[in-house]
Amino acid sequence: MSVTAPLGFRAAGVTAGLKPSGQPDVAVVLNDGPSRSAAAVFTTNRVQAAPVTWTRQVVTGGLVRAVVLNSGGANACTGPAGFQDTHATAEHLAAAIGAVSDEVGAGEIAVCSTGLIGERLPMDKLLPGVSAAVAEASRGGGLAAADAIRTTDTVVKIAFRRVDGYSIGGMAKGAGMLAPGLATMLCVLTTDADLEPAQLDAALRTATATTFDRLDTDGCMSTNDTVLLMASGAAGVKPDKTEFTLALTEVCADLVRQLQLDAEGANKMITIEVVGAASEADAVTAGRAVARNNLLKCAIGGEDPNWGRVLSAVGTTDAVFQPDRLNVAINGIWVCRHGAPGDERAKVDLRPKDVTITVDLSAGPHSAIILTTDLTAAYVHENSAYST
């Protein structure tokens, strides 16, 4: 049910001592081939962690033999020394794999990190952890790997799909700093289909555009976001490109829902559905504005259908619309019609965990969905002392 479900992959998760809690904190996912094709997408934050810079360079070659991931430290804003630490981690994993199988270069090793920004990783703990993870890597190690990449996540996030002779698996982590440009989020996707790097890249960009890039729980963009897709080709199947992209999108959507459900401090899972937009870009812009409106998020947390805050958020955007043609429904009740009061807001039932807000811009045929959560005291408490 995870990254080791597709043929050709092994994984492990171990405790290296990076986390004060003593929980697992180092994972590896190894691609035993025969193919090593890979693609990745990254955060669009201009401040990027050393492992993002490193892995971006690696995937330009289209080949990834393995990925090492650590929690307990982001290795972001750590200067040249932090980049050297990432390079050393990749070289260490390459050597560890090469010692037991074939020759592997650091240029085929992806590195991902997550945790507190602004502190270097304890390499005297990390590197032995990498060695231990390689030694333990197995087809049954997917769940342990997913557990080792958690930070404030309360549960592991894994997904799997089997399609016409090949499989796609995935694991992800992320509970805070979830915003477009991915999320504070690391995700590894695997498949035993036989695909070229360019095909993987096209499929991944299509899949993430409507899944990870549409999750916006707190409007905060991470420095470390990475979604890595690796193909082993072990199933010997060359899939239809459209079919593969659809299956990959399903796996990504599954993981995104899990990320939303485990978002820090969240009680309500909010779907912002924007319809009647002049363009998809307008729909996304309006949806993100609503998703990031703290007043509305607090109202939903308090089960108050305060639809005026929806209109107020939409009004801050450059989306095409006329204020007197806006319509808003909350859980199916059209509380606003033509920019004015509609059905009685008292009819809205906000007791369920899932809340859907529909915004009709009445400006065209396009639509988009953005996922967010409510804003609670628990979120504020958790993020008020993250570094201490």
Image (spheres, rainbow, N blue to C red):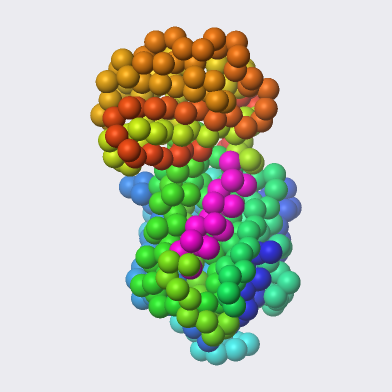
Q: Assess whether residue 252 is covered by the magenta stretch.
A: yes
Say whether residue 43 is left or right of residue 176.
Answer: left
Say whether residue 326 is left or right of residue 18.
Answer: left
Quarter of the image for residue 284 reads top left
Please give the name of the residue rendered at 60% of the width and 89% of the height, measured from the top-left corner: 101
Q: Nearer the viewer, residue 75 or 166?
A: 166
Q: Assess whether residue 293 is covered by the magenta stretch.
A: no
Q: Indicate the quadrant containing the N terminus: top left, top right, bottom left or bottom right.
A: bottom right
- In percent of width and height, residue 361 lies at 34, 27
Residue 58 visible in the picture: no
Q: Nearer the viewer, residue 216 or 312?
A: 312
- In percent of width and height, residue 62 lies at 39, 75
Say whether residue 380 is left or right of residue 283.
Answer: right
Q: Indicate the quadrant containing the C terminus: top left, top right, bottom left or bottom right.
A: top right
Query: Which contiguous range is marked in magenta?
Result: 244-260
Please give the name of the residue rendered at 47% of the width and 28% of the height, measured from the top-left corner: 358
- In percent of width and height, residue 259 lies at 59, 45
Quarter of the image for residue 367 reads top left
Furthest residue toward bottom? 102
Say whether residue 22 is left or right of residue 181.
Answer: right
Please give the name of the residue rendered at 33% of the width and 27% of the height, measured from the top-left corner: 362
Please give the name of the residue rendered at 73% of the width and 72% of the height, measured from the top-left corner: 140
Rendered position, 383 above or below 150:
above
Give the main secondary structure of the magenta stretch: helix
Rendered position, 149 above or below 229:
above
Residue 7 visible in the picture: yes
- In percent of width and height, residue 171 lies at 60, 59
Image label count: 0
